[in-house]
Image: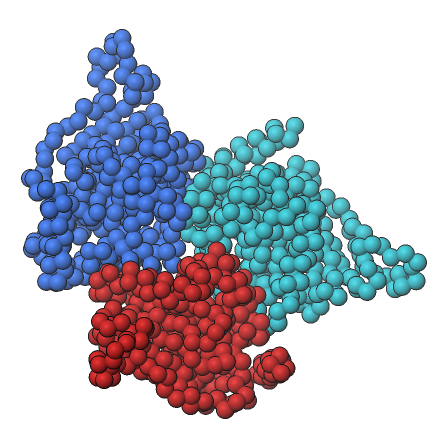
Chain colours: A cyan, B red, C blue
Amino acid sequence: MAAVPTLAPRIARSGVLPLCRRPPAWGRATQQPPACPPLAPRRGFSNNKILVELDESKGVALMKFKSPPVNSLSLEFLTEFCISLEKLENDRACRGVILTSAVPRIFSSGLDITEMCGKSTEHYAEFWRAVQEMWLRLYGSNMVTVAAVNGSSPAGGCLMALSCDYRIMGENPKFSIGLNEAQLGIVAPFWFKDTFVNVVGHRIAESSLQLGSLYPAPEALRLGLVDELVPEEKLQEKAAAVMAQWLALPDHARQLTKSMMRKAVLDRLAAHREEDVQNFISFISKESIQKSLRMYMEMLKKKKS
Amino acid sequence: MAAVPTLAPRIARSGVLPLCRRPPAWGRATQQPPACPPLAPRRGFSNNKILVELDESKGVALMKFKSPPVNSLSLEFLTEFCISLEKLENDRACRGVILTSAVPRIFSSGLDITEMCGKSTEHYAEFWRAVQEMWLRLYGSNMVTVAAVNGSSPAGGCLMALSCDYRIMGENPKFSIGLNEAQLGIVAPFWFKDTFVNVVGHRIAESSLQLGSLYPAPEALRLGLVDELVPEEKLQEKAAAVMAQWLALPDHARQLTKSMMRKAVLDRLAAHREEDVQNFISFISKESIQKSLRMYMEMLKKKKS
Amino acid sequence: MAAVPTLAPRIARSGVLPLCRRPPAWGRATQQPPACPPLAPRRGFSNNKILVELDESKGVALMKFKSPPVNSLSLEFLTEFCISLEKLENDRACRGVILTSAVPRIFSSGLDITEMCGKSTEHYAEFWRAVQEMWLRLYGSNMVTVAAVNGSSPAGGCLMALSCDYRIMGENPKFSIGLNEAQLGIVAPFWFKDTFVNVVGHRIAESSLQLGSLYPAPEALRLGLVDELVPEEKLQEKAAAVMAQWLALPDHARQLTKSMMRKAVLDRLAAHREEDVQNFISFISKESIQKSLRMYMEMLKKKKS
């Protein structure tokens, strides 16, 4: 389950979802919409691929990936993600963000293979910088970040979950998670690896990365890849409860502590960023890799039809 | 449960406890005190805050923290601790030391907040150097060090336990242990973090430090934060048995091995010691931090009365 | 259970075992030997101490240690091991190797003590370089390496297992495994330690190395020191199945991933190799160490008779 190539025009312009942006008139409404209790001022914004709702009373944003069919991490998705995250990061009303999916049964399928196949060197470079940027911002975020993993989460989708402070997954053995790049003949870059080792330790990371292992939710819990499993219908509620627990702590000390834990690994990519882009380009441009990606895309097309 | 500010004069001059220092006259005693069987030559010394008994026949010292109400790590306590440890370290008759508390239900409450609140820059510097010194000596000790954690052990108390070779905790769910600095808005310094990561791994350390988690004894065991739980009344006996097991190995190879495992982390503080003092001073001198420490002290005062 | 000094002439010249090297005449045999099904082209080679069978149809070599009584890692054994591994590494027909023992109840007893006792400085240097070479080649192998640990595996034997990609052990509580060097008063070198930490983490490695712990198979599984236990009679079958699973992945990405995981630790020895040889020589030449090795050898001699 890596990124399914989007055969339909990639940018669906699905329009802005009805956000819970409270208009002044609402004050006079006789009936409040249940999701917006009277005392919770909410703001939201939505791009094509990502929907954000900010509950100012709690200081918590809910960021929903809505890029069907599988929330693959296209250049557009990554760009919107970074912009959304930056907005929240700079918003003093926001202290924490919950990542989840608006698409059933999939959190994110990872990097969009169409971005890595048959494109120009310049495109590969632009795409890879966006992948790096996503991770640098998310892993280095000053906010509390909770992943509410409500579906499968292979490869880059797993990286996003790993980059959060806490991972809660739907208690569904059909949901799987893991850095399965090796199954496509692709090597996870060193900073995927560093993030993974920080979560599951060296031994599990080593064999998982070599085998491209995808773990069903219960196994992911056992390995510490996710912190908790809850029934799917309780996932958002649990994520909110965990977030409240993290936000009970003073921000400043928590942020300094988080930075102390993650700085070494973040600095390593920051120091070798351009080198990492060049590595990606030279690897992905190999004819053998391109061939295996094309075959994979063909296989996915057939699966769909 | 961090250091309770001692409202009574801090240096209680409680006098020297009746140590098991065998006077010549004892040889003629008709009844031996049960704690000192006839064949065990024992020496001891006691300062105001720490009581040391050395059993020369076994090469093992028992170091008891006796600084009621909560064995907080005041400048005086830390100074006595370092002197006591150095004495033992240089005593060829001593190969191992067991740390435990003479105060019921508390191992140590951690750094004494009164030392960090409303004092001069010079005082902060002196205090912090003593904290560093305690850790450098304990984590780097050539002796076998066993923590018999017979009570709660937050913050600096937890660090002392983490710095030993082995941790045995009383099987009492009311006893808790953890680096809970974040709960006071304080950041655990990098060497607390390094020590913690070496024991519980990166993932647990990261979330625990951010949340300032205190774990009840059974949970601490599950995470590897302590190595073993035993009923409280068996704690000293078990600590002695574990110590005997460690001392069955030749000292020289064990010491070289211990140094190999801990050197990188010890060297890191040694190389940045003065920088770390300055960091502490500038952090602790912040008005926001001082305010939060004062509030915490007020809360503890009210709790007591 | 470290290396038993071989009292009989060390090089037994036991001759070449009947390898499954298919002679042309076999094509006409009415009955195929069950271990060599008709379609599996096999090649093999054997030295004095190690037997290798390569199944070209699967791309898998089986490397059997056959140096009774305990497969101790003598200079001769190590030299043969390195040559055999290099042959396979350079053989395009070979993608994976399974290490196992042809001697009952022992995988390998570790470094041969006779090589470290009463010999010249030059001999110590030559021996230690061979130990380094074994590890550098095995830990850095491009092939998939699976240890089928069909017996006890102390010290250097444990290191060989730790250096593989995956460890399967016979489900026999009498089989034990661990880096027990400390029990002989010997210090495991830093690269043994690094390999161990990568597998079991810092806390377990620290206490295990100081105590020279040998773990029975079930305990080794619990600590992650081995990945799986299977009944002894299923060991080879299971190893073949695991190998097939690893070989299902494309080699190139897997090799790059493995190198990414292990490079830091491999580079560290490569950068300090001669220094490490000198350390070994000066340590092993100490009269106290020589004495303790002699005593250990005496004890083993008595045990045998």
Q: Is residue B8 left or right of residue C173?
A: right
Vertical position of residue C269 compared to residue A41: above or below: above
Residue drawn at point x = 43 percent, y = 60 percent: B230
Please state, as top left, top right, bottom left or bottom right, where the N terminus of chain B lies in the image: bottom right
Vertical position of residue A243 compared to residue A250: above or below: above
Q: Quadrant of residue B142?
A: bottom left
Q: Is residue B206 left or right of residue C154?
A: right
Residue drawn at point x = 92 percent, y = 59 percent: A29
Res B217 visible: yes
x, y percentage for residue A211?
45, 40
x, y percentage for residue B190?
45, 71
x, y percentage for residue C235?
34, 32
Q: Is residue B82 left or right of residue A240?
A: left
* Residue found farthest to the front: B30
Q: Is residue A25 left or right of residue C249?
A: right
Q: How many marks?
A: 0
x, y percentage for residue A302?
61, 28
Res C97 visible: no
Residue drawn at point x = 29 percent, y = 36 percent: C150
Please state, as top left, top right, bottom left or bottom right, where the C terminus of chain B lies in the image: bottom right
Residue nearest the viewer, comparing A67 with B29 = B29
Residue drawn at point x = 57 percent, y = 31 percent: A298
Vertical position of residue A273 compared to residue C102: above or below: below
Residue nearest the viewer, comparing B186 with A209 = B186
